[in-house]
Amino acid sequence: MWFTIERVDTYLRADVYGRETAEETKRFLQAVASEALKSGVDRVLISSHSSRPIYRVQQYGLAEFLETVASRPAHRIAIVADSFESKLAQQYVVRIARARGLNVRSFSTEEAAAAWLQRD
C-alpha cells in the first residue's frame, strides 16, 4: 500500500493505492485525519485505487476517522472508488456516516466529488 495526501484549493485530496488490510486502512485514515487537523482543512476527498472494499467499519478505524474529520462544523467528506465492489462498500459507509449526522457522500467521479467539496 502507498498513499498521497495533498492540499488542493480548499480541500485535502487523499489517494490510497493497493490498500488490503485493516491495519493499512487505519494507518492511511490516521494520516489523513492528522493532516486535516494540522492544516485546518475541513473538506476531504478520499480516492481509493486498486484497494479492497471496506465492509467492517469498526475494524478498519473508519468511525474514528469520520468523527475526527467531522469535528469541524463545515466538514465535508467525499469518497470515490475505482471498482464496482468498492463503490458498493462506500455506499454502506456513507449510510453509517450519515446516520451519525456526518456530511459524507460517495461519488462516481473525482470531478463531481471535487465540485461538491468546493461549493459553499
Image (tube, rainbow, N blue to C red):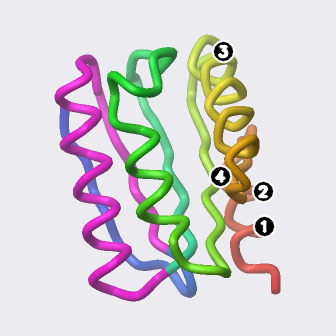
Residue 30 among those drawn in magenta: yes
- To which residue does mark 3 refer? 84
Name the image quarter holding residue 80. top right
Instruction: Give the residues drawn in magenta, as a range.
Output: 12-41
User: Which residue is painted at 49% across and 52% down in the image?
Assistant: 66
First in sequence: mark 4 vs mark 3: 3
Image quarter hosting the C terminus: bottom right
First in sequence: mark 1 vs mark 3: 3
Q: How far apart are marks 2 and 3 (CA)?
A: 17 Å
Nearer to us in this view, 108 or 20: 20
Amino acid type of disc 1? Trp
At which x and y percent is residue 100? Answer: 68, 47
User: Which residue is painted at 47% across and 82% down in the image?
Assistant: 41
Q: How far apart are marks 2 and 1 (CA)?
A: 6 Å
Using the image, tell me which numbered label, if any, was put on residue 110: 4
Using the image, tell me which numbered label, if any, was put on residue 116: 1
> What element does badge 3 sit on?
helix
Amino acid type of disc 2? Ala
Nearer to us in this view, 58 or 54: 58
